[in-house]
Image (cartoon, rainbow, N blue to C red):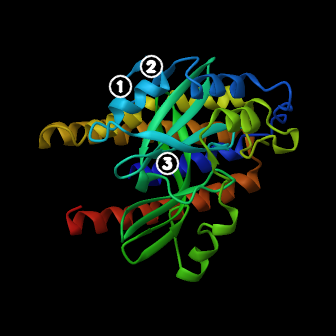
Amino acid sequence: MKKIITSFMAACLLFISVYPASVSAAGKNPSPALQALAAVMMNKAELFDTDNNKTVYLNNLLKYIIEYDPAAKADSFAVVDLDGDGTPEVVLSLDCHGGGYEVLRYANDKVFGYNLVFRAMQWLQKDGSFNCTGGADYNYTGKMRFLGTTWDLDDRAYEEGNSTYFDDVPIDEKTFSKYWLDENNEVNWQDFSKDNIMKWIINRPANLDIKPALPKTTIAARQKYLDGLADLVLLNSLSYSVGHDYSNANAEKYYKGWDAELNKIYKLLSKRLSAADMEKLRVSERQWIKNRDQRGNQSYILGT
């Protein structure tokens, strides 16, 4: 249910947005984001570890997030705009038992760190999209959507069991393959070294500037709204922590929370869209609700 609702909400946000200005050139004068990211990577500044809610230096972080592998280290990195807002993130590929990634994000004058297991971010693309897999029958392609100190997968194309979807609408395998990842568009990974941090971040060539990919009224306004949804995402994670009754109560709060947000966006759209566009939205919404209910009934029957 979360995935269906959040992807629909993301689509709604696109209706009420415009493109912001491009990020200024880096080169000899790196942006505040690049400066801060480089400082963290060289252990000259701390980051905020979102998994443990504390500030820590990168070299110390890797010692305790991978408890079963004290020799864990970052062996390479890529600079990519994961959420499409025009501000680059740095993704560290971790050399450890089982692999994994640490995502470094600059926001509100600080650097946040998000730890991902290997299967949560595979085949990272230059446009920030990647593959997330929960097993042979569950594969998703999407981007990170940052929500305060947590994050959500803004997935568009995905497969569950023998069914494939795009924006929660069933599609055939041939159409699905068009949205899958392209191995020729993978990011360029650089060896984790001081020289490469200087070359690819601090002295990053101006022609490699990140351009905003997602339309929005303003970057700050959009991100403020997304950060406000963080409690809903955290509420969902608690639904599976203790007891059947507790899980049901949390799930109901979670559903009502998203429903309230959808109604809020719908009212905004009704004031801004033309009559023709509003009718298109209504048709799309009815189809989305029909598909949501069908998938919900399938899950209930299967006991999942």
Is the Cβ of the residue at disc 1 closer than 8 Å to that at disc 3? no
Q: Is residue 254 left or right of residue 196?
A: left
- All told, the count of numbered labels is 3
Residue 200 in percent (x, y) is at: 74, 39
Q: Secondary structure at mark 1?
A: loop
Image point 55% across, 22% down: which residue? 43
Disc 1 vs disc 2: which is toward the camera?
2
C-alpha span from label 2 to label 3: 25 Å
Disc 1 vs disc 3: which is toward the camera?
1
User: Going from the N terminus, do you reach mark 2 or mark 3 first?
Assistant: 2
Image quarter of residue 76:
top right
Q: Secondary structure at mark 3?
A: strand
Q: Amino acid at mark 1?
A: Asn
Q: Nearer the viewer, residue 1 or 145?
A: 145
Q: Nearer the viewer, residue 103 or 158?
A: 103
Q: Answer yes or no: is residue 225 visible.
A: yes
Image point 50% across, 58% down: which residue? 122
Eyeballing the image, is 19 above or below 143?
above
Image point 59% across, 82% down: which residue? 174
C-alpha span from label 1 to label 3: 20 Å
Residue topped by disc 1: 52
Eyeballing the image, is 7 above or below 31?
below
Disc 2 vs disc 3: which is toward the camera?
2
Image quarter of residue 83:
top right
Residue topped by disc 2: 56
